[in-house]
Amino acid sequence: VEQRIRNHHLIQKIMSPNEASLLIKDGMNIATSGFTLSSYPKAVALALVERLKKSGEKIRIGLYTGASVGEELDGILAQEDFLCRRYPYQTNESLRKRINAGTCAYTDMHLSHFSQYVKNGFVPKVDLAIIEAVAITEEGNLIPGNSLGGSPTFVEMADQVIVEINLSHPLGFEGMADVYSVEKPPFRKPIMITKPDDRIGTTYIPCTPEKIAAVVITDIPDQGKKFAAVDETSQQISQHLIDFLKQEVSAGRLPENLLPIQSGVGSVANAVLAGLKESSFENLWVYTEVVQDAVLDLIDVGKVKAASTTAVSPSPEGLKKFKENIDFYRDKIILRPMEISNNPEVIRRLGVLAFNTAIEADIYGNVNSTNIMGSRIMNGIGGSGDFARNAYISVFTTPSTAKGGAISSIVPMVSHHDHTEHDVMVIVTERGFADLRGLCPKERAKTIIEKCAHPDYQPMLWDYFERACKGKFQHTPHVLDEALSWHKRLLDTGNMKAE
Ligand code: 0RQ
């Protein structure tokens, strides 16, 4: 215990998860650690839900996190309908159902904005923070697990803090974090990161013993998430992206070792980076928000010099490898708060190559990454907008069809806009890549239909575009009555294809 809780006074604040859960009251806004299913608190929420289920008492709370958290937090709270409000990102099935049924208010936000919103008082105040940690220092500071997300901001802004010391995290995590808090305007100083591995802050989350209301000891591990095996489609997407990068190097627009890479979440994103392992690229830098298995593998083979991230969220096997070899990885991975990992200033300065995933894209290059058929939230925008808008080159990948071909991912008009035509430079599907830089809308449409759309849908897209071009206004031609008719047809008949 002394190794984990180095402040003697705080040893007296150790309590059971159930006792600590009594600090959570109806109507509170609770902010927690956790980002992409890593290092979110579990024990207190599990105890809370178990106790309330027994007593039959109902509560409604707001939950603020870095990004997605797992079943033991979002899942169980959503199942009992205890969540009235949720910021800024989620990926949980039960919570998604509540949001789409309208019983939990969800505000889907750029992750770089969220810490600012909390600091500036743009969202209701944080009453209580629950932070999973590896250890507490003599001064009361917190050593984070394998994610930082919004934790430093939440600790700074909360009235009180519950710390869950998770023994499943090795003490070797200490030293990986670089915690720096963005100042308030006006006249704030630049964030002095000019290389992905620059260190500008502390290895702990600043906190005081007085703020810590309870310490809970647990060993419940993060569940982690298995990735789908790299299938042919993902492999083709990855190959086209690598061809594009090679083209940029040959043209002298990118250095031989590229520029710092950001890659989104999910199986396709993981496959894209897995492709880099087989490629000729070396001495790569990573400046991203989530490190999944593929980046660990690239580090293993010596292809990555250093990776800056706000979370290390590999599969269960990847997590085991990461923990067992933490002394090796600690030198190569810098864990930053999400207000730094996703900061537009730093992303623009470093010249990041941003690879993110689209649900659908339209012929003019607008991208929907969040809402299926315009209305049903999938996950959220996460950091994709932070990176896409500020990137040196922003790339969006997607298979050209979904649901066994019933859906075309290239449509006349997207049913929801996350990344507008102004932020999307390249679209890649398994068919090829469309380089949209410098093209006007009609040139973009031709390129996207030709290079990215599935052959089953190409004739329909050409037909739409050619008829649109017969209209009066020639800048971004549309047939407004038909622009969303593909989505409507899918909802009516289960297929986007015309009969
Ligand atoms: O649905 O699970 O019911 O089969 O969408 O699609 O192809 O499995 O792709 O796992 O890579 O997720 C955009 C959601 C892609 C993700 C998104 C259906 C499809 C399937 C998932 P099923 P895939 P992925 C870093 C950056 C936004 C946040 C982000 C995401 C499901 O990448 O959330 O990038 N991105 N953050 O069948 C209807 C279409 C569809 C479709 C796919 N056109 N219409 N359904 N699907 N295309 C991380 C953070 O920010 C924290």
Image (tube, rainbow, N blue to C red):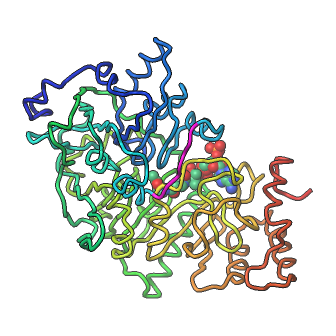
Question: Residue placed farthest to the top in the image?
Answer: 54
Determine which quarter of the picture holds residue 261: bottom left
Residue 133: percent from the left, percent from the top?
25, 38
Q: Residue at x 48, y 53 (%)?
A: 265
Q: Is residue 409 left or right of residue 37?
A: right
Determine which quarter of the picture holds residue 252: bottom left
Residue 270: percent from the left, percent from the top?
47, 54
Residue 123, above or below 102: below
Span shown in magenta: 104-110
Residue 238: percent from the left, percent from the top?
53, 63
Residue 261, above or below 14: below
- Which is the main secondary structure of the residues drawn in magenta? loop
Which image quarter is the C terminus in?
bottom right
Q: Is residue 189 left or right of residue 239?
A: left
- Is 371 one of the magenta-colored residues? no
Between 299 and 157, the one nearer to me in the picture: 157
Q: Residue at x 43, y 67 (%)?
A: 279
Determine which quarter of the picture holds residue 180: bottom left
- Is 105 one of the magenta-colored residues? yes
Question: Residue placed farthest to the right in the image?
Answer: 499
Q: Residue at x 64, y 39 (%)?
A: 102
**Label tally:** 0
Between 188 and 473, the one nearer to me in the picture: 188
Residue 264 visible in the current orientation: no
Which image quarter is the N terminus in?
top left
Residue 168, above or below 364: above
Residue 296 visible in the current orientation: yes
Residue 394: percent from the left, percent from the top?
50, 71
